[in-house]
Amino acid sequence: MRYERILTVQDISCVGQCSLTVALPILSACGVETCVLPSAVLSTHTAGFSGFTFRDLTEDIPPIAAHWKKEGIVFDGIYTGYLGSVKQINYVKEILDGLIKQDGFSVIDPAMADNGKLYPAFDEEYVREMKKLCAAADIVLPNITEACFLTDTPYQTEYEKEYIFELLEKLCKLGAKTVILTGVGYTPETTGVAVYENGKYSYYPHRRISRGCHGTGDVYASAFVGALCQGKSTYDAARIAADYTVSCIENTQSDPAHWYGVKFEPVLPKLIKQF
Ligand code: PXL
């Protein structure tokens, strides 16, 4: 079995089943050594809770990175999610340049928006900096809302293939090598993931579950990176992550009290079986 060392940079939302509390268990289950760089510590995530605490860890990043450099620590890949500040995005860009192996990879999930809106903590300046980070990425993994913000495209809930193509091409023009666009549905009952690699478009449709769930973007991205680290092709990793995310939502939808995230843990054996 392959054994890769990944660095994931995202926040710790202590409660809420997103970001690091999702990435760590999923990547570990995929057999990946997972090193973490927490971007911030929050009492909960910001989507639906109010009065959450937020401790920004931006200024901890340079000394942590400097220590790793001194120790000669490098990573096979980096996967970033929710980043707490504009300055932090710049620090992550420096890490991409200095701490990833020469043939290593970067997966940037520009976790900043959903359903046509930016998350509460973010503004236009944040989007501008995120564009630069995505430009430096091997793989970007936005949902449609994030893709619209990154490419200055008006957000639409209904669209044809041309609209999706335009988003994919604009994202590649930005500089990203490969784009995985999630939440792409051409019919009311389905959604899916569009993969754009070396100018080639492929699409994996899957079941759309009407109940929207928080944290599914992080579940998806973590399973995608895990599958990639197991040697799966980009398309297969995108497919495996989609099937896993759907199973997590199915495992949660009958429990209205569990509105803040998905019960991804009991479904992990299903993901591991893919490897
Ligand atoms: O799942 C994305 C995410 C991660 N981290 C924090 C969030 C969100 C989404 O709202 O608030 C803190």
Image (cartoon, rainbow, N blue to C red):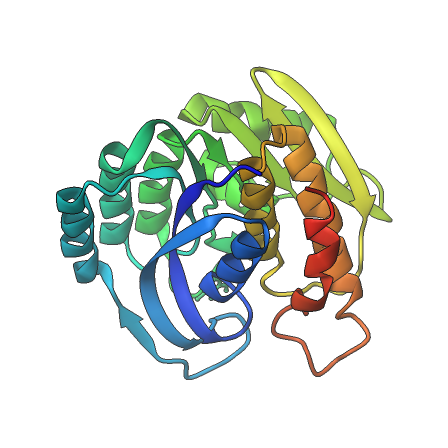
Q: Quadrant of residue 63?
A: bottom left
Residue 21, placed above or below residue 169? below
Q: Residue at x 34, y 40 (%)?
A: 75
**Position of residue 56 measured from the top left corner of the image (x, y, whole percent):** 26, 67
Quick one: 71 or 1, which is closer to the camera? 1
Which residue ends up furthest to the front in the rendered image?
A: 1
Task: Measuring from the top left, give residue 220's x and y in whole percent.
Answer: 61, 50
Location of the C terminus by quadrant is top right
Q: Is residue 115 above or below residue 191?
A: below
Residue 184 appears in the figure:
no
Task: Please state if 46 lies on the left or on the right of 271 as rendered.
Answer: left
Quadrant placement of the N terminus = top right
**Residue drawn at (49%, 32%), measured in percent from left and top?**
139
Note whether 160 is above or below 129 in the view shown.
above
Q: Is residue 43 left or right of residue 170?
A: left
Between 153 and 182, the one nearer to me in the picture: 182
**Measured from the top left, where is residue 247 in percent x and y?**
77, 57
Q: In the image, what residue occupies the spot 66% across and 64% down? A: 264
Which image quarter: residue 261? bottom right
- Give me the residue at 72% from left, 58% from top: 269
Horizontally, residue 74 falls left or right of residue 176, namely left
User: In screen coordinates, is 244 left or right of 139?
Assistant: right
| Residue 167 can be seen in this image | yes
